[in-house]
Amino acid sequence: MTSFDSLKRLQANLDALRQQDRHFQLFGASQHHYQLNLPVTPQEVAAFEQKHGIVLPEDYRSFLLCLGNGGAGPDYGLFPPREYGRELEKLQEISLALPFLHQSSWQPDPQTLDAEALAEQHTYFGNYWVQGAMRMCHGGCGI
């Protein structure tokens, strides 16, 4: 299936959800109403990629350019890249350009998660562990 076909199918699914859930009862629907933000320009995508030293995956780039720039999505919806960029600026220690650390499932040894280990810079919940990962949406309460 081509990217264009996938985008058409996604738009049709959003339209169907909007028709089936007219009162926005599904979790997060009251926030995004199954609507996507307007698409971005190629210049905006290029500026985001240049600023963060990355190249977005082609399917995501097509989504941003042809279908929408955030909005409807899982839970409370998709972040527009510019919003994600603002979050990165606040966190400062996260870089999209660094390689993602985990290529398989990861769970630290519980023996190393004592009070001393948690006080170190790279704690279990630290941003260090999500280098190279772009948060695309949120489920509320920091999830």
Image: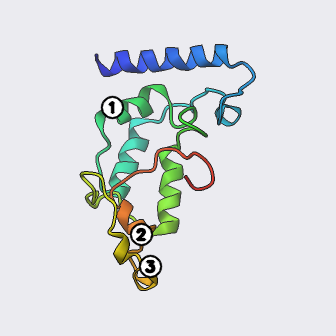
> Earlier along the polypeptide chain: callout 1 or callout 2?
1
Q: Amino acid at mark 1?
A: Asp
Work out whether 55 lies above or below 90.
above
Quick one: SS at disc 1?
helix
* Residue bearing the label numbered 1: 59
Residue at x-position 30% and y-position 52%: 105
Q: CA distance from mark 1 to mark 2?
A: 31 Å
* Residue bearing the label numbered 2: 124
Work out whether 112 lies above or below 140.
below
Do the residues under discs 2 and 3 have CB atoms within 8 angstroms? yes
Q: Residues within 10 Å of mark 3 (few under 14, many from 20)?
A: some
> Earlier along the polypeptide chain: callout 1 or callout 3?
1
Which residue occupies the extreme right position in the image?
23
Q: CA distance from mark 2 to mark 3?
A: 7 Å
Q: Amino acid at mark 2?
A: Tyr
Location of residue 14 by image quarter: top right
Residue at x-position 54% and y-position 33%: 73
x and y percent of residue 87 in the render? 52, 59
Q: Amino acid at mark 3?
A: Leu
x and y percent of residue 94 in the render? 40, 65
Work out whether 81 lies above or below 132.
above
Residue 118 numbered mark, or none? 3
Of residue 101 and residue 48, the one placed in the foreground of this image is: 101
Residue at x-position 58% and y-position 45%: 139
Q: CA distance from mark 1 to mark 3?
A: 38 Å
